[in-house]
Image (cartoon, rainbow, N blue to C red):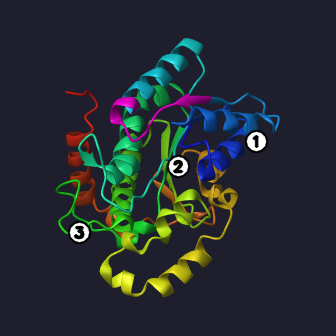
Amino acid sequence: MVTAGTGGIGLETALGLAVAGFAVTVIGRDAGRGAKAVERINATGPVHPARFLSADLASLDQVRVLAKTIAVDHAASGEPLTVLVNNVGAMFVERQTRGGVEASFVVNHLSPYLLTELLLPTLSAGVPSRVVNVTSGAVAVAKRVFDDVEPPGGYYGFHWYGRAKLANLAYTLELAERLNGSGVSVFAADPGGAATDMTNGTMTDPKIVSPVLQLLWPLVRRTFERSTSGPASAAARPSIAAATDETLTGRTGIVIGAQAHPVAPHRTAADPRVAEAVRRLSERHAPLTPT
C-alpha cells in the first residue's frame, strides 16, 4: 500500500515493490492519475496486478473511510497487508487549513499517523509486516515545540513542512518502540533530493523560507537545484529498501538514508519528551474515534 503513489517518488516506490513481487495498491485523489499509474505498473508484467484506491489524504474523514475500506477488503480476501508506505507529503507557500487545522501538519503528519494507527490491526494480522514513513532533511530547520499544531510567528512553508515531518519522525520512532516484538517493523525513509512537482514548484518560491534565508536565496536556490536534480526513481530507493531489504527482518526503528543505508535519526526526533508532545497533539487533532 503506497500513499500518494500515482506519481513522483510514490509511483517509483510502487514500481519497485511490484518488481519485488508485491501486489501493489496505490492511493491518490485523482482517478485519472491513478489509472495511468496502474497501467504503468502493470506494463512491467508484475506477478500481481496493481490497483488504485481513491482518497484525498488531506481530509482526515477520507483517511478514516480509506482505512475501513482497506481493512474490510483484506479481511474479506484473506490476503495480508504486509507493507504500508506513507509517502504522502505536501508543502504550501501560503498558510492553508484542512478541517480547521494547518494543512502541512495534516498532510505530512496527522494523515499518515491516523492511517497507520487505524490499520495496525490489519498489519498485525499480516505479520511479519512493515510500516515505512517517508521523512525529510527539512526536519533540521524545524521549530521543535509541539504545544500546538502551529508555533507562533510568521508562516514559512519550508519550515512548517519540516516541523510536520519532525513530528512524524518522532512518531515513527515511538511507534517502533511501542510495537517492538509484535512482528510489525517500523522504519523511516529519507529520499534526499529529487526533481518532483514539489521541488520544481513550491520550493522555488523564496517566500517558503524565513527572512534570513530569503536574503541568501540566490545561493540557497543554486544549492537546492543541485541537490534536487536527481530522478524520482533514485529518491524511491530508501523506501523500497525499507520495505524489502531482508537484512532489516526483525529490526525496527531504523532510518534509511538517501543512499538506502541506515543512518542515525535526527536527535530531536529521538527525544521522548518530543514524542510525548507529538502524541498528545496527534490524539487531540486526529482522534482514532471521531467525536
Mark earlier in primary sequence (2, 1): 1
The span from disc 3 to disc 2 (Cα, nearest Å) is 40 Å
Q: Residues within 10 Å of mark 2 (few under 14, many from 20)?
A: some
Q: Nearer the viewer, mark 3 or mark 2?
A: 3
| Magenta stretch in the rendered image | 52-62
Residue 193's x, y, as percent? Answer: 58, 67
The span from disc 2 to disc 1 (Cα, nearest Å) is 23 Å
Q: What element carries label 2?
A: loop
- Dot 2 amino acid type: Arg
Q: Which residue is drawn at 17% across and 65% down?
A: 152
- Dot 1 amino acid type: Val
Q: Is mark 1 on a helix, strand or loop?
A: helix
- Dot 3 amino acid type: Gly
Residue 13's x, y, as percent? Answer: 64, 48
Q: Which of marks 2 and 1 is in front?
A: 1
Name the residue that disc number 1 marks.
Answer: 19
Residue 275 among those drawn in magenta: no
Mark earlier in primary sequence (1, 3): 1
> Compared with residue 114, is residue 268 higher up or lower down, i.e. above or below?
below
156 or 3, which lies in front? 156
Name the residue that disc number 3 marks.
Answer: 154
Question: Within the image, what quadrant is residue 78 found in?
Answer: top right
Label for residue 251?
Answer: 2
